Image (cartoon, rainbow, N blue to C red):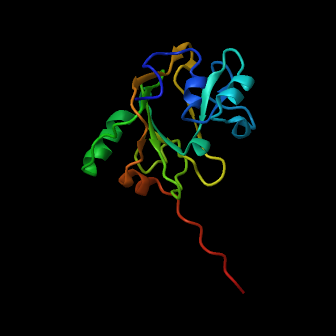
Amino acid sequence: MGLMAATADPDPAIALAAGLAVFGLPPGEKRPEPGWQRRCSSDPAVVAATWRPGDNVGIGCRASRLLGIDLDRHPGKPDGIAQFQAVCDRYGQPWPDTYTVRTPRGGLHLYLRVPDGRIIGSTSGGRSPLGPSIDTRGPGRHTGGHLVGPGSRIGGVPYVVIRDVSIAPVPEWIADLLALPTAAPAATA
């Protein structure tokens, strides 16, 4: 069973709060307002009390122990979906069977659970070890990244659930590729 029906629900925050920590993004926007980490909650009552009409859905990756793999599709750039398939093929691994959302430009967000003790950060702008046109949003060390959730709209086009299954654990091979280096112990005098 997944998080919600595979539709573009205009107010999915309450449903998402059952399994993920969410917060309101400004209507029509992807970029969060300052302090979003403090407003992020998985308590439906808290979300209902802070939700503003028209808000897009933000999902806090740190509070949710979530890795979002963002497979972009932008004109004139490599196709993130094809790039990710090539990475899966290179490592001899299947495409993760997990909760998946189609973005307004036809890309995909793959949702994966990060186990306690694993530190996976966020990448953008082609810096992901997974390849070009693949961004990652992870729990990180401090504040973590965020995803734009299903039901949100950018330019009037919704983020839509296309694979409504439970969020799978991040495969070990992906976690290893994306793991942040551990901090070196402080030198003693």
Q: Nearer the viewer, residue 188 or 115?
A: 115
Query: Which image quarter is the N terminus in?
Result: top left
Compared with 168, 107 (above or below) is above
Residue 159 % position (x, y): 50, 21
Q: Residue at x 27, y 47 (%)?
A: 93
Q: Nearer the viewer, residue 55 or 157?
A: 55
Q: Residue at x 62, y 22 (%)?
A: 56
Q: Nearer the viewer, residue 177 or 134?
A: 177
- Tell me if residue 73 can be seen: no
Residue 33 % position (x, y): 72, 32
- Residue 42 left/right relative to 132: right
Image quarter of residue 22: top right
- Residue 67 left/right relative to 25: left
Q: Residue at x 57, y 41 (%)?
A: 64
Q: Nearer the viewer, residue 51 or 142?
A: 51
Residue 117 % position (x, y): 53, 59
Compared with 123, 153 (above or below) is above
Residue 153 % position (x, y): 56, 18
Query: Which image quarter is the C terminus in?
Result: bottom right
Q: Total of numbered circles in the picture?
A: 0
- Tell me if residue 177 can be seen: yes
Image quarter of residue 76: top left
Q: Residue at x 38, y 36 (%)?
A: 98
Compared with 46, 187 (above or below) is below
